[in-house]
């Protein structure tokens, strides 16, 4: 009996030692102190694994994370980065469930998050922080005012900015010579060309952005929504949006009986020529698709005259993160000029910088200005001229819920 137990113990020990380092080594969370020096944080992060939970629907984004970011973190800090693709709502529910079960240490080190998902996690007390102001690159390169709110909700250091995005429409000039550049003209175009327009089904992020954009256009602009949630204002204005969307519904692809399940499906319909427009929350998305060979070179982008909503996306760290030191080092690297420049290049991703270019040394400023965003992409100046802020998160949740009731399931 003793020999059998000894043999089993030997076998288990051999199996444990033969596992890859990323699987076998647990980060030393006991020694992490929120007020420790950055040098101590770098030392503690070295040799550990960071599990980055993020939306996994962009092949170019995934490749950039898996190659450039993972490679640089390994080279600079001996950190092994593991990308875990998961919708934000799913990992939010995971964090809330773990908290409800009293679990103090989870599996997530870093999150790509913003909007209502950030609001829900921060209010539930499942995020670590404040931490953003402790990141050296945040202090050196970020304008704090530009990262003060997330969909109108105070950030208060519980997120670090990651990139910026703005909503655009995409069309193929070989098929459509004059795209409708207002929501009023869009109605007329859709009715004249039945079956040639649609949008992703909310709560898909792009589809949800489309209805938020339409809300601004059909109710008198964004300014009225910028003072926090107003229930009476919502109840007054939301029916105007539902009326607009229901007016075009019978003329949509599949007669509005079904909608693309996500933005990738929308892109596929557009690429196949089944619809004449796509849309994206990244201004360089069309150029990315051209470079990948998914779109023809005749595709370009446009924005509506009523404005184009923009936002900042962030990283956050769960309170239950097993490797907070590694997560901090990763969030800091993502704010480095090197990472932000690489991310800005449309051959990699095309995501707009979260850092303030004017805070960089002159040679780095020149490198950012030299990035070729491609002919399909509107210039930063053209985008800035129509940029309008995102709606507060409380409105977003109601819009997504009520769209299903008053549009999708409307008779």
Image (tube, rainbow, N blue to C red):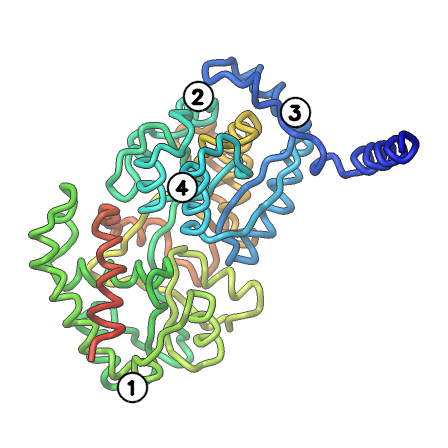
Which residue is label 4 attached to? 96
Q: Residues within 10 Å of mark 1 (few under 14, many from 20)?
A: some
Q: Element at badge 1?
A: loop
- Gap between marks 2 and 3 measured at Cα: 18 Å
Mark 4: secondary structure: helix
Marks 2 and 4: which is nearer the front? 4
Could you tell me residue 259's position as x and y percent? Answer: 36, 74
| Residue beneath disc 3 | 46
The answer to whether the residues at label 2 and label 4 have Cβ atoms under 8 Å apart is: no
- Could you give the CA–CA distance between mark 1 and mark 3, rounded to whole angstroms? 58 Å
Q: Are marks 3 and 4 in contact (CB under 8 Å)?
A: no
User: Picture coordinates of residue 328 (x, y %)?
Assistant: 51, 28
Q: Earlier in the sequence, mark 3 or mark 4?
A: 3
Instruction: Return the mark for residue 194.
Output: 1
Relative side of 78 to 214, left or right: right
Q: Relative to residue 357, is residue 65 depicted above or below?
A: below
Residue at the spot 46% in from the left edge and 14% down from the top edge = 35
Q: Is residue 6 visible?
A: yes
Residue at point 46%, 18% (across, down): 34
Q: Nearer the viewer, mark 3 or mark 4?
A: 4
In this figure, which residue is indicated by the disc labeled 2? 134
Spatial separation of the CA atoms under disc 3 and disc 4: 29 Å
Q: Marks 2/4: CA distance?
A: 26 Å
Q: Are marks 1 and 3 in contact (CB under 8 Å)?
A: no
Whether label 1 touches label 2, CB < 8 Å: no
Query: What is the distance, in whole Å, between disc 1 and disc 2 at their CAs?
Result: 54 Å
- Disc with the residue nearer the chain's start (4 vs 1): 4
Q: Which mark is residue 125?
A: none
């Amino acid at each position: 009996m003793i020999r059998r137990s000894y043999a089993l113990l030997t076998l288990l020990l051999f199996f444990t030692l033969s596992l890859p380092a990323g699987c076998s080594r647990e980060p030393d969370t006991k020694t992490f102190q929120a007020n420790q020096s950055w040098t101590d944080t770098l030392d503690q992060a070295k040799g550990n694994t960071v599990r980055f939970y993020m939306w996994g629907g962009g092949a170019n984004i995934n490749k950039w994370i898996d190659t450039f970011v993972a490679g640089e973190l390994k080279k600079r800090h001996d950190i092994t980065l593991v990308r875990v693709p998961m919708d934000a709502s799913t990992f939010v529910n995971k964090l809330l469930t773990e908290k409800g079960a009293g679990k103090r240490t989870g599996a997530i080190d870093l999150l790509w998050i913003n909007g209502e998902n950030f609001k829900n996690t921060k209010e539930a007390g499942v995020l670590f922080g404040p931490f953003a102001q402790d990141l050296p690159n945040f202090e050196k390169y970020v304008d704090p005012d530009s990262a003060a709110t997330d969909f109108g909700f105070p950030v208060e250091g519980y997120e670090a900015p990651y990139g910026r995005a703005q909503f655009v429409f995409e069309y193929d000039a070989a098929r459509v010579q004059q795209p409708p550049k207002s929501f009023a003209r869009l109605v007329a175009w859709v009715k004249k060309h039945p079956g040639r327009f649609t949008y992703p089904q909310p709560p898909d992020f792009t589809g949800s952005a489309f209805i938020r954009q339409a809300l601004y256009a059909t109710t008198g602009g964004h300014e009225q929504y910028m003072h926090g949630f107003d229930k009476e204002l919502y109840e007054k204005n939301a029916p105007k949006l539902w009326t607009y969307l229901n007016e075009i519904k019978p003329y949509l692809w599949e007669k509005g009986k079904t909608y693309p399940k996500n933005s990738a499906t929308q892109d596929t319909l557009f690429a196949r020529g089944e619809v004449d427009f796509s849309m994206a929350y990244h201004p360089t998305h069309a150029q990315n698709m051209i470079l990948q060979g998914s779109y023809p070179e005749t595709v370009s982008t446009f924005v509506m005259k009523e404005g184009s909503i923009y936002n900042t996306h962030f990283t956050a760290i769960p309170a239950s993160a097993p490797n907070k030191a590694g997560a901090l080092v990763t969030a800091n690297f993502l704010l480095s000029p090197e990472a932000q420049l690489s991310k800005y290049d449309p051959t990699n991703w095309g995501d707009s910088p979260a850092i303030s270019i004017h805070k960089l040394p002159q040679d780095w400023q020149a490198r950012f200005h030299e990035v070729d965003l491609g002919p399909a992409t509107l210039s930063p100046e053209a985008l800035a001229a129509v940029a309008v802020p995102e709606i507060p998160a409380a409105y977003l949740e109601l819009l997504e819920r009520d769209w299903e009731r008053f549009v999708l399931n409307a008779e």
